[in-house]
Image (spheres, helix red, strand yellow):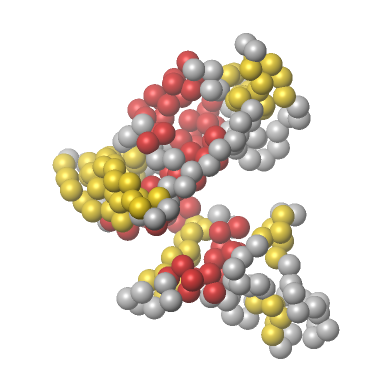
Amino acid sequence: MNWKSFVSGVVLGSVLFSGVSFAAPKVVKLMFNGTEIHSEVTPQIIDGSTLVPARALAEALGAKVRWDEINQTVIVENEAYRQLLRKNAEIGERDAVDLAGDAKNHYWHMSIGGGGDRRNGSFDVHGQDYRWMGSDLDTKIKFIEYVEQLYTPEQAESYWKELTETRSIVEIERKLAQPNADGGSAFAWGDATAKLIQEGNGTKTFHFQVPLFDKFEEKDIKLRYVEGKGWRIDEPVDTIR
């Protein structure tokens, strides 16, 4: 059994919910913020306790789950914890993979307009249909701060300049909007392997093998240590997507 199957099947033991009785239905739904979460392993009731898959619940809460084969341990880490780790002077190959996986999620979160509340409706800008950005990314300051969680300030500023020059983002009365479009990526950056190939003064370059269906794509990704913030990706933002 590979680690994905294992983690997908791992159940959070003794997750108790008050009011659950023995007469509860065998099929249990898992809801998060009004949306049903589907997983390979269905939540179930055993002896009056409701048990849910660790991966499905953790990822719904914004955490990352991985299986440590050597120590036979399921590891759950949220983004705040991984941000704290990156502030250390050292960063390993596993940390680099986690950073790249977070970068992919960041890219597509920005591409779909962010989250939270947003103004309803779409409107025309220079003959193109636009929508408002979500409240977590609806100003320039919020947008750049979000990019800088994972990228160097120079790369964040460069990305902002590129998006505004190509009208991929427009600013109207200090609120941001973007063209009405969605997308996704089959690159599995979070499941990649990384090997340190170059190290300098405050920089490290890793060679990545990134799964893409039944093959791999290879890319070199440079990281730079930003004082007071930690390790950041020093590549154009759309490199990892």
Does residue 83 appear in the picture of this structure?
Answer: no
Q: Residue furthest bottom?
A: 47
**Front position in the image: 174 or 161:** 161
Query: Is residue 24 shown left or right of residue 62?
Result: right
Q: Residue furthest right?
A: 23
For the point 43% across and 76% down, the residue is: 1
Q: Position of residue 9 (x, y in %)?
A: 54, 74
For the question of whether residue 79 can be seen, the reply is yes
In this picture, is 227 found above or below 56? above
Quadrant of the rendered image containing residue 69: bottom left
> Residue 230 lies in what quarter of the image?
top left
Front residue of 220/202: it is: 220
Identify whether 143 is placed above or below 96.
Answer: above
Foreground residue among 161 and 81: 161
The outermost residue toward the top is 126
Which x, y percent locates residue 216? Answer: 33, 51
Looking at this view, name the residue that lies furthest to the front.
Answer: 214
**On the rendered structure, is 11 left or right of 209?**
right
51 versus 168 height, above or below: below
